[in-house]
């Protein structure tokens, strides 16, 4: 691929050299024409002198009289003037006189030689590194057009190397907006959310009123903070919605956060706002399903004398009690333990759930219990999804979270004890995932 770039560069250099040399070659030709014109004028002058001398000799010898001599001399002079006019026809400038010797200066030729040399020095990576060629190559590779990405979509070695090269170049190119946006999205695809947030922050500093950049930055922060509605994420969401009140992603995060807090009324309101933003396709269907579920739950709650939060009914913890109908479906076995020395209320609620590594923050499967029930082997399966399209069956990479809630609700608090698993591949059979609750969120 880089060979094609250099071919284009050579062709452009040749074109530039042509523009430099073309006037020089034209002026050289004009000089030769001027020399030929001068030679012809000199010949006419010599012929005139010879003919004039012959007329004088004939007059002296008495072969012609004075009247005939004068007439022939006048005719000879007219012929000379006619010849001189024909020689000078088509020339009205004095520039040719400066080149009447046919010579051309050396400086244009030197300039023509310097054009390709300067282009190489300016744009090559080993020169001034203005980077037109290298940046284009890196951009094409990151967009999937490079040879390194053509082998396998799961082979990220070449992509990672390309991203690192671009990152190095961007340190000296703070105004390369396209490069910064490209690398920020590359980091998002790679799961490097912290780096993606930094890159989007750089662009936001340059374009603070761009709602799209603000949305990307907020989503990156949300993923960095383990899909929790932390203080900085909440501030970023509010800023994005102030720029664009119809940002569906921000409205969905608000809705799902309210759902996790068991605030069904607020969750329903946010989902309705997301629906009114004009979404369509599968996303619109998922939002409608969430609205239907919330309206149903709120209707049940309204009919009862006292409202209560949405209750998630767990399946039996023992793997032997799993219904035969679940055989072949996706499921996880999670052993939840509490570390020695951790002192919490035995009646404090424990949430164990799986969430997508890259996707909406809504739990895909949830179990809850009290601290007094630990240690416990918990089963999470695809029947525990809160809505269609949001279960273990719909995501291949998930993360399992165990959390002791200090507030009694699912929303995270800095004083909660929390344990996180690494990425779990749901396309293969997994053993028991062990999570030990030993550190508070604020200490992680």
Image (cartoon, grey):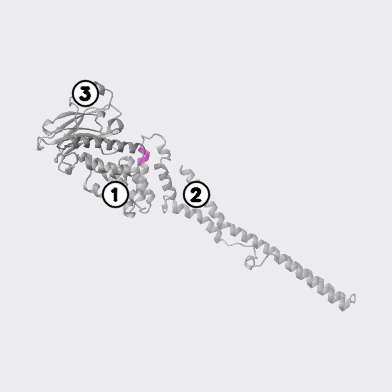
Please report whichever mark, 2 or 3, sits nearer to the chain's N-terminal start: 2
Whether pointer 2 and pointer 3 mark residues with C-beta atoms closer than 8 Å, the reply is no
Please report whichever mark, 2 or 1, sits nearer to the chain's N-terminal start: 2
Q: Which mark is residue 17?
A: none
Q: Residue at x 54, y 56 (%)?
A: 112
Please report whichever mark, 1 or 3, sits nearer to the chain's N-terminal start: 1
Q: Helix, strand, or loop for circle 1?
A: helix
Whether residue 422 is visible to the viewer of this picture, yes or no, is no
**Mark 2 → mark 3, Cα distance in angstroms:** 67 Å
Q: Which mark is residue 9?
A: 2
Is most of the magenta stretch helix, strand or loop?
helix
Q: In screen coordinates, is 348 left or right of 42?
A: left
Point out residue 40 in the picture as x, y percentages from the top left corner: 73, 65
Residue 104's image quarter?
bottom right
Point out residue 203 in the picture as x, y percentages from the top left corner: 33, 51
Q: Which residue is mark 1?
A: 241
Disc 3 crowd rating (10 Å Cα; few below 14, some 14-19, many 20+) is some
Q: Residue at x 38, y 35 (%)?
A: 153
Asked if 19 appears above or below 358 in the picture, the reply is: below
Q: Which residue is mark 3?
A: 322
Q: Nearer the viewer, residue 65 or 298?
A: 298
Q: Helix, strand, or loop for circle 3?
A: loop
**Mark 1 → mark 3, Cα distance in angstroms:** 44 Å
The stretch of residues the image draws in magenta is 156-160
């Amino acid at each position: 691929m880089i060979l094609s770039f250099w071919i284009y560069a050579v062709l452009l250099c040749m074109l530039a050299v042509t523009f430099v040399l073309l006037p020089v070659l034209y002026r050289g030709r004009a000089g030769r024409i001027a020399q030929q014109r001068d030679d012809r004028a000199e010949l006419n002058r010599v012929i005139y002198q010879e003919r004039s001398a012959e007329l004088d000799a004939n007059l002296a010898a008495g072969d012609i009289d004075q009247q005939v001599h004068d007439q022939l001399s006048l005719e000879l002079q007219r012929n000379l003037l006619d010849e001189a006019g024909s020689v000078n026809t088509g020339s009205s400038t004095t520039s040719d006189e400066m080149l009447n010797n046919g010579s051309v200066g050396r400086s244009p030729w030197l300039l023509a030689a310097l054009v390709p040399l300067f282009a190489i020095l300016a744009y090559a990576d080993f020169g001034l590194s203005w980077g037109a060629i290298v940046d284009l190559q890196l951009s094409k590779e990151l967009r999937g057009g490079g040879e390194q990405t053509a082998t396998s979509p799961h082979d990220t070695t070449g992509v990672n190397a390309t991203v690192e090269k671009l990152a190095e170049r961007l340190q000296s190119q703070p105004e390369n907006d396209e490069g910064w946006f490209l690398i920020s999205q590359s980091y998002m695809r790679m799961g490097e959310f912290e780096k993606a947030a930094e890159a989007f922050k750089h662009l936001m500093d340059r374009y603070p009123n761009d709602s799209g950049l603000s949305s990307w930055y907020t989503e990156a922060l949300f993923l960095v903070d383990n899909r929790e509605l932390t203080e900085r994420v909440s501030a970023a969401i509010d800023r994005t919605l102030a720029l664009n009140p119809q940002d569906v992603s921000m409205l969905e995060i608000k809705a799902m956060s309210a759902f996790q807090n068991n605030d069904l009324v607020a969750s329903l309101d946010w989902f309705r706002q997301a629906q009114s933003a004009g979404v369509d396709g599968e996303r619109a269907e998922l939002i409608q399903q969430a609205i239907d579920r919330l309206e149903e739950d709120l209707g049940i709650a309204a009919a009862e004398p006292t409202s209560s939060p949405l209750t998630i009914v767990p399946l039996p913890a023992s793997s032997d009690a799993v219904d035969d109908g679940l055989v072949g479906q996706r499921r996880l076995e999670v052993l939840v333990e509490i570390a020695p020395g951790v002192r919490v209320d035995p009646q404090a609620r424990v949430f164990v759930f799986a969430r997508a590594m890259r996707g909406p923050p809504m739990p895909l499967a949830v179990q809850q219990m009290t601290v007094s029930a630990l240690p416990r082997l918990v089963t999470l399966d695809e029947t525990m999804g809160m809505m269609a399209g949001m279960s273990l069956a719909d995501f291949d990479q998930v993360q399992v979270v165990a959390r002791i809630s200090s507030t009694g609700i699912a929303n995270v608090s800095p004083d909660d004890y929390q344990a996180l698993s690494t990425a779990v591949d749901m396309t293969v059979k997994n053993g028991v995932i062990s999570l030990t609750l030993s550190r508070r969120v604020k200490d992680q």
